[in-house]
Every structure is written in C-alpha cells, then in structure tokens.
C-alpha cells in the first residue's frame, strides 16, 4: 500500500466512498419499497421486483449483508485515509483526515444517497437486487453466522423474528390509502372503493324501503283487480299478501305473471304457483354480509323483520348495489320522490322522506344517526307534535311546518340557502 502513488490511493478511496454510498442508498431503497406495489410488479414478471421480493423474504439476511459490506468499505476507507494522511503530513494530519473523511462519508455516502433512495426507491432497489443476490450466495456463511448471533441476542431480549410478519392493512389504513391515491384512482372509483369499505358498518334497516311505502298485491282482491295492478306496476317483483302487508306469502316476478296472463292461465292458484317464497332478513344484518347472502340464495328481494318477526320493510339488490356505485339516476328530483324543489330555492319535503337519502343526494348536513325520516327528526328535536306554521332551525337549516296529519308531520318547507352557520343547534 505504501508503494502506491497518492493518485492511486485517492482513486481507491473514491471507489470505496462510492461503494459505501451504494450500500447505504440501497438499504434505504429496499426497506422503503411499497410492499403491495412490489408484489404487483413481481406478479407481472418484473425481473428486479422478483429479485427484490425474494431478498425481502428474509430481511435479517439482507440487512446483515448490507451492513457487512458497508462497514467493511467504511473501515477500509478510514484505514486508507490514515495512510494518505501519513504520506502527506505525517501523524499530525491524521485527525484532520479523520474529520474530513467523516464529513465526506456523511454527505456523499449517507445523507445524499439515502435521501435519493427514499424519494425514488424503485430506481435504486431493483438494480441493487441484481447485485445482492449473487453477493449473498458468495458471503452466505459469514452472513449466516452474523445473523445467528444477532438473532440469538434478540431472542434473549424477548424479540422474535416473526414479530414483523403479517403486517396487513387494517380497514382504516386501507381507507387512508384509497383517499390519498389522488389522480391514480378517479374520484368515482375512489368513492366506490370507500363505499365497499363502509358496507360492513351499515345495516339493512338503514337502506330498506319502509313498511308503509311497500307496494304489494292483496290476494283477497278479485282476480280482475289483481290483473290491473300487475299491469300497472312499476316494479319487477311485487310482494303478495293476504289481508295485511304483514302477512306476505310470496314474491311474484312481473315477467312470469305477464307470461301466464298472455297464455290465459292467470288465476289465484297460478299466481301462488309462480311466486317465490318470501325471503326474510334480520334487521341487524350488515350490508356486506347481505350482499353475499343475495348471491348465495340467488335472490333479488328480501323482507326485513325485527327481533319479534314483525315486517319492517323491503330491501332489493339494486338498493344495495346503489350503496356501492351510487344512484342510477342523475336528477336529484328523480332520485328522491318525496322532495319538490321550488322556484325560490326552497324545497317541499314529505315527512316520510329518508334523512339518509337527503344527505346522500343533496349533500345537506343533517343528523344521519338517529331518526330515519324528516318527521322523526323534527319530532325528536321539538319533543312534541308541532302545529302547522311552526318554524324552527334544524342543524342551522330554517324549516317551516306546512302540514301535519294525526301524530306526524306531513309536509315541511326546507330552506337550505338560508342556513345559519353560527349559534345553531
């Protein structure tokens, strides 16, 4: 070493500094790779991703190899800097050489390469994987011995090498990933993904058609009236009941009924034969589970019942799918039939209108937890049945009671443009 010219020593030192930068940068790059993107690239046959994924299966071996190489070149660079200092200025130049080498390694072999690797991990990690695979085979005995000692010390400290396994994303973490995807996922698809995640937190009773809005056919009517109702129906499937909507005996598909009618075979017996038996759903069933139940049972319509078995409402597959993909119509007036927009910017709202639909369709900031209808929300707020002409502020929105019927609010005038944002309930 002492026989080499200073130019050669400086060249070797420069190579060692670059090798140190490679080890430091590649370590950061490999450890900061997006594991899900890495798996996606590996499944698509990306060579660098396949090698990087194989290395990261045993991170202890990879880290052992990188630190072994990094420490070796750094120590060698320090020894070489000492030789250069002795050649140039004698023993008095050694502290200056040590300080200067520390500064150079810190900037060029640590901070700069690690920052670059953190910003663009794939650009450095994938090429480095081609180097580390054969290097790991070459130094495997030494790396194995180092890892054996290190892992033994960790076990004595109560740390297992399996503690980091199974770091799957939680539902909330996945929600954060979707929301922060930005332009990578279009807004409409992002909302669909978030809606899918929300299915687990919603129950069928929240989106069902309430009992009083369910349209069915009473089998106690004359067959002529039943035929008229079948022909005038807007729905594909209609519940059949006897005497009361609480006594549903089946669900008939309009297409089957029209087919029987065209053949001249329509009768009460035929109607019963072509109808499906009722499919009952407990009110507390989560939407994600009910979606699977609809698929497994090959059903498109279910009847919601409470814990006592009483009929509460009706749920269709299309209602459930709308929770994921959104409404199938674009005009808000068509999507919520209980709302009539007025020329002055106000809305006439039926008391039976669903609060959840109003929030979802119009974006109004109304309490969605608690009462399900506008009538229920007003009664809960006022704690009494209001008289027509009563005005109130509900969550800052001015509301005027226009009509009441019996013990419920029938029609209200809702003025979202006049909402007060301060000092409101």
Image (cartoon, helix red, strand yellow):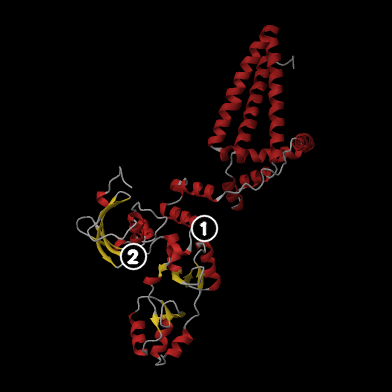
**Residue 89's image quarter?**
top right
* Left or right placement of residue 38 versus residue 202 in this view: right
Q: Is residue 178 visible?
A: yes
Query: Dot 2: what SS?
Result: loop
- Other-residue count near label 1 (Cα within 10 Å), few / some / many at <14 / 14–19 / ≥20: some
Q: Which mark is residue 352?
A: 2
Earlier along the polypeptide chain: callout 1 or callout 2? 1
Q: Is 238 or 141 nearer to us in this picture?
A: 238
Query: Dot 1: what SS?
Result: helix
Query: Residue at image x 59%, y 45%?
Result: 35
> Comparing marks 1 and 2, which lies closer to the viewer?
2
Above or below, comparing residue 204 to residue 52 in the picture: below
Q: Is residue 90 visible?
A: no
Q: Which mark is residue 294?
A: none
Query: Residue at image x 39%, y 93%?
Result: 264
Q: Is 96 or 410 nearer to us in this picture?
A: 410
Residue farthest left in this picture: 343
* Left or right placement of residue 402 versus residue 141 in this view: left
Q: Residue 373 location, x and y as percent?
A: 36, 61
Query: Which image quarter holds the N terminus?
Result: top right
- The answer to the question of whether label 1 and label 2 lie on touching residues, with beta carbons closer than 8 A, is no
Q: Which mark is residue 200?
A: 1
**Residue 340's image quarter?**
bottom left
Query: Residue at image x 52%, y 58%?
Result: 200
Above or below, comparing residue 308 to residue 225 in the picture: above
Q: Residue 54 location, x and y as percent?
A: 68, 46
**Residue 128's image quarter?**
top right
Q: How many marks?
A: 2
* Gap between marks 1 and 2 measured at Cα: 26 Å
Q: Residue 2 location, x and y as percent?
A: 74, 14
Q: Residue 233 location, x and y as percent?
A: 35, 78
Q: Is 11 or 339 nearer to us in this picture?
A: 339
């Amino acid at each position: 070493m002492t026989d080499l010219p200073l130019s050669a020593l400086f060249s070797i030192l420069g190579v060692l500094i670059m090798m140190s930068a490679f080890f430091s940068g590649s370590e950061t790059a490999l450890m900061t790779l997006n594991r899900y993107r890495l798996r996606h690239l590996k499944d698509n046959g990306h060579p660098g991703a396949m090698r990087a994924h194989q290395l990261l299966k045993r991170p202890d071996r990879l880290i052992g190899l990188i630190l072994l190489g990094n420490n070796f070149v750094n120590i060698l660079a320090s020894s070489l800097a000492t030789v250069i200092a002795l050649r140039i200025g004698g023993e008095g130049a050694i502290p200056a050489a040590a300080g200067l080498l520390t500064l150079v390694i810190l900037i060029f072999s640590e901070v700069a390469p690690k920052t670059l690797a953190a910003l663009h991990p794939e650009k450095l990690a994938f090429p480095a994987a081609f180097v580390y695979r054969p290097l790991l085979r070459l130094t495997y005995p030494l790396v194995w011995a180092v890892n054996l000692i290190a892992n033994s010390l960790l076990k004595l400290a109560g740390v297992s090498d399996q503690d980091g396994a199974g770091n799957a994303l939680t539902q909330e973490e996945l929600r954060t990933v979707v929301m922060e995807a930005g332009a990578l996922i279009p807004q409409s698809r992002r909302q669909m993904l978030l809606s899918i995640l929300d299915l687990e937190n919603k129950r069928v009773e929240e989106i069902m058609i309430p009992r009083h809005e369910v349209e069915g056919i009473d089998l106690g009517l004359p067959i002529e009236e039943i035929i008229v109702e079948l022909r005038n129906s807007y729905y594909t499937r209609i519940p059949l009941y006897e005497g009361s909507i609480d006594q549903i005996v089946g669900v008939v598909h309009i297409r089957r009924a029209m087919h029987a009618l065209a053949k001249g075979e329509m009768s009460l017996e035929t109607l019963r034969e072509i109808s499906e038996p009722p499919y009952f759903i407990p009110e507390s069933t989560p939407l994600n589970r009910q979606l699977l139940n609809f698929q497994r049972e090959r059903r498109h319509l279910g009847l919601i019942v409470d814990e006592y078995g009483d009929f509460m409402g009706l749920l269709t597959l299309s209602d459930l799918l709308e929770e994921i993909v959104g409404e199938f119509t674009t005009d808000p007036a068509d999507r919520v039939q209980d709302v009539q927009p007025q020329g002055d910017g106000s809305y006439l709202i039926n008391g039976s209108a669903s609060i959840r639909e109003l929030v979802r369709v119009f974006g109004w900031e109304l309490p969605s937890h608690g009462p399900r209808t506008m009538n229920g929300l007003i009664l809960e707020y006022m704690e009494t049945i209001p008289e027509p002409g009563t005005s109130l502020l509900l969550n800052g929105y001015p509301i005027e009671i226009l009509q009441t019927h019996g013990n419920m609010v029938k029609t209200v005038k809702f003025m979202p443009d006049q909402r007060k944002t301060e000092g409101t309930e």
